[in-house]
Amino acid sequence: MSRASLLAEAVEHFAKNGIGDASLRGIATSIGTSHRMLIYHFGSREGLLAEVVRTVEQQQRDLLAALSDLPVEEQAEEFWRRVTEAALVYGPLFFELSAHAMQDLPHTDSLKADLINVWLPPLIELCIRAGLPPEEAPAYARLGLAASRGLLFDLLLTGDRAGVDEASALLNRLFTLPVR
C-alpha cells in the first residue's frame, strides 16, 4: 500500500472509530497493513497522527474553497456546520497535537507550519469578500481563526453545541458589520 492510501485509510479509520489511544499495531490491523509499514511511512504513531491532522485540515481548506460560490454568510454557516462535525471526531487529536507543536516535538515539524500560516490566505480572501478593508483583513483572518478554534475547544469541553453555534453566528455577524 502506498503512503497516500495508508493515510487515507487511517483518516477513514479514525472517522469511524474515533482517535482514542489506539496503538500503532491496532491501527495497522484495522486498515489492513503492518505496523512496520506505518513506521516506514510515518516514523511513529505520533507521526501518523500528525499526518492525519494535516490531511483533515487540508480537507477543511478544500471545503472552504468549494463553498466559495455561496454568499459569504451562507459560506460561513455551512463551513462552520461541517467543521464542527469534523471537530467532534478529530478535535481532541488536533488540540493534543497542537500542544505537541507548541513544545516543538519532532513529529509535528510539518504540522506546525500548517496550523496557522496556510489558513491565513483563504481566510484573508474571505474577509475581503465580506467587505473588510484589505489592509485589515489579515488581522481579522487571524482573529477569526483563533476565535473559531476557541469555540471548537469549548464545544469539545462542554458539549454545548447550541451555545457554541450561537457564538459562531455572532462572530460571523461581527465580521460582516460595516467597518468604521
Image: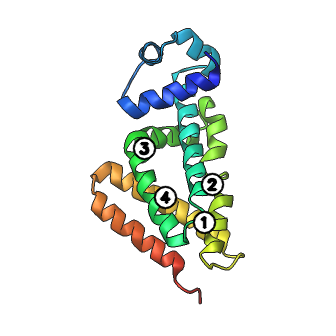
* Disc 2 to disc 1: CB gap under 8 Å: yes
Q: Is residue 117 above or below residue 178?
A: above
Question: Which residue is denoted by mark 2 in the rendering?
Answer: 119
Residue 138 picture location, percent across and down:
66, 68
* Disc 2 to disc 4: CB gap under 8 Å: no
**Residue at 43% from the left image edge and 45% from the top image edge:** 86
Question: Which residue is denoted by mark 4 in the rendering?
Answer: 79
Give the Cα distance between marks 2 and 4: 14 Å
Q: Type of residue at label 4? A: Phe
Residue 50 quadrant? top right
Question: Which residue is denoted by mark 1 in the rendering?
Answer: 141
**Which label sits in the foreground, 4 or 1?**
4
Q: Is residue 175 left or right of residue 15?
A: right
Q: Earlier in the sequence, mark 3 or mark 1?
A: 3
Q: Is residue 147 above or below residue 62?
A: below
Q: Type of residue at label 1? A: Ala
**Residue at 60% from the left image edge and 35% from the top image edge:** 108
